[in-house]
Image: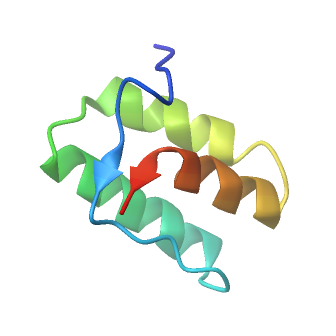
Amino acid sequence: MEISKLEKRLTNHSILFGENPLVLLTNFSNSALKQGWSQAEVESVISKASQGDYMALIRTLRAYTFL
């Protein structure tokens, strides 16, 4: 399931540069599920975020986050 960055964003969730990638993905996943995202939506974002290097991971997760 492909979701647009404009469709859904996490609120009040910070993505901390320097944090372990697995911690970032786990925290993102937990927050998204708590905010009503479906498992497929979460997996879509995690899949995109995991395709590149660390900076791509940060950029992708931040694209789906609104502080």
Answer with left or right where residue 2 lies relative to residue 26.
Answer: right
**Front in this rendered view, residue 22 or 6:** 6
Expressed as whole percent of the image width and height from the top left, the position of residue 34 reads: 14, 51
Expressed as whole percent of the image width and height from the top left, the position of residue 56 reads: 77, 53
Expressed as whole percent of the image width and height from the top left, the position of residue 31 reads: 26, 58
**Front in this rendered view, residue 42 or 66:** 66
Expressed as whole percent of the image width and height from the top left, the position of residue 13 reads: 34, 66
Seen as rendered, the residue at the extreme top is 1
Answer with left or right where residue 51 lies relative to residue 18.
Answer: right
**Front in this rendered view, residue 39 or 65:** 65
**Residue at image location 39% in from the left, 37% down from the top:** 42
**Residue at image location 36% in from the left, 63% down from the top:** 67
Considering only vertical position in the picture, is 48 above or below 40?
Answer: below
**Front in this rendered view, residue 1 or 9:** 9
**Residue at image location 51% in from the left, 15% down from the top:** 2
Answer with left or right where residue 29 lies relative to residue 38.
Answer: right
Number of disc labels:
0
Seen as rendered, the residue at the extreme right is 53
Which color scheme does this rendered protein use? rainbow
Answer with left or right where residue 28 lies relative to residue 11.
Answer: right
**Residue at image location 56% in from the left, 46% down from the top:** 63
Considering only vertical position in the picture, is 1 above or below 54?
Answer: above
